[in-house]
Image (tube, grey):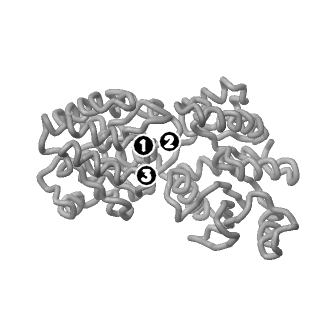
Amino acid sequence: MKIAEVVSSFYPNIGGIENSVYFLSKELVKLGHEVHVITLNGKTTHETINRIHVHRLKRLIHLPLLPQKEFDIAHTYRCEEFDVVHIHSIEPICLQELLISKYLNGKPTVATLFSIGGWMRHPRLPIRITAGPYERIALRLVRKADIFHVKNEGDKAMLIKLGFNASRILLIPDGVPKYAFDDFDGSAFRNRYGLMDKKIVLYVGRLHHAKGTNILVKAMAEVIKRRPDVTAVLVGQDVDMKSNLISTTKSLGIQDHVVITGYISENEKFQAYSACDALVLPSLYDLVEAYSIVISEAWAQRKPVIASAIGAIPHRIKHGVNGVLVPPSNPKVLAKAIIEILRNPKKAKTLGANGHKNVATWPDVAKMLEKAYFVASKY
């Protein structure tokens, strides 16, 4: 099967969607499919990554008026005889490819939808005013897809509420690589950052204001009053928060209890999971937690998770069963949850073990989506 995966940003860019499409594409190739990723970039290029054909397009709209080289590349991929087109959001490039595939080429289409209504519910009024109307229009246009793919029960319920055909909605989670279940050397991570005798509260993700890392830092000021042996380790690429976080730790006098590693390798990331006592995800908005793959990664290592009750998270974490839910933007409640987990290692172990039961691998996910592609071709 010749498959087009359409996404606005792709590997080596870092992010949840980028990783999701990359790992899915790798597994589909292993299943014998020819996979083409259509994405945007600063210039038009074509390359092959791990047998995945990647088309990076400079412009959203492709017309004969474009420079010849760019038009040739766009025309080549546009005329590909794809058996199915899978879009991974309602961003403009995805909607464009969906409509062209359906109306001009009559191709089967699958649409992955997440954080449905997130822009319309955004806490910032200017964003609700500008992005909300676009989301309403996009959700009308995306109904033209043959299959709707969601990753949690909340998004499925929202689509049904909006009048989408329930029989065409498939719930398939994101996965983790098989190596996520391997034994990693947590002591190597502890040694590297001088944390051998510390309890580690881990955050993994971008250092972005919407991810609530400042809430975690403020919570740490409360935690160390009761547990001076605790260090928060923040792993991930800085977007707009590192200098602010460093300033906050100094003003609170807790700079010795917060480590900011920046971006680290995949192997070192899983060493961090192995080393930690709990993963904390203090995000603020629904939109930034469309699935929260870091929860699955922590669960793969049997670690307990403390997370804000926003976005997809409450549909994945059952409070007190496989994790702990806390309200967003509340450092004191978060601190209390951290202290409680560290005080009850038996409970923490049970939460991590229960979460471990709910983790899918990318090979499993690819096989489920492969079936979805065949179903789409019947409509």
Position above or below: 362 against 325: below
Q: Dot 1, how many residues are within 10 Å of its Cα: few (below 14), some (14-19), or many (20+)?
A: many
Q: For the residue marked with disc 1, what is the amino acid?
A: Lys
Q: Is residue 58 above or below residue 259?
A: below
Disc 2 marks a residue whose amino acid type is Val
Is disc 3 in contact with disc 1, using a CB cutoff of under 8 Å? no
Q: Is residue 238 visible?
A: yes
Residue identifier under label 1: 211
State whether residue 183 appears in this view.
no
Q: Quadrant of the N terminus?
A: bottom right
Q: Are marks 1 and 2 in contact (CB under 8 Å)?
A: yes
Disc 2 target residue: 288
Q: At label 3, which amino acid type do we have?
A: Asp
Horizontal arrangement in the rendering, residue 275 relative to residue 245 (left or right): left
The mark total stands at: 3
- Quadrant in which residue 79 is drawn: bottom right
Residue drawn at x 57%, y 36% as measured from the top left: 115
Comes first in the chain, label 3 or label 2: 3
**Quarter containing the C terminus:** top right
Mark linked to residue 240? 3
Q: Position of residue 182 (x, y in %)?
A: 33, 57
The CA span between labels 3 and 1 is 11 Å
Query: Which residue lies at the image location 31% right of the left edge and 59% below the top edge?
Result: 261
Q: Residues within 10 Å of mark 2 (few under 14, many from 20)?
A: some
- Residue 202 at x, y = what percent? 29, 47
SS at circle 2: helix
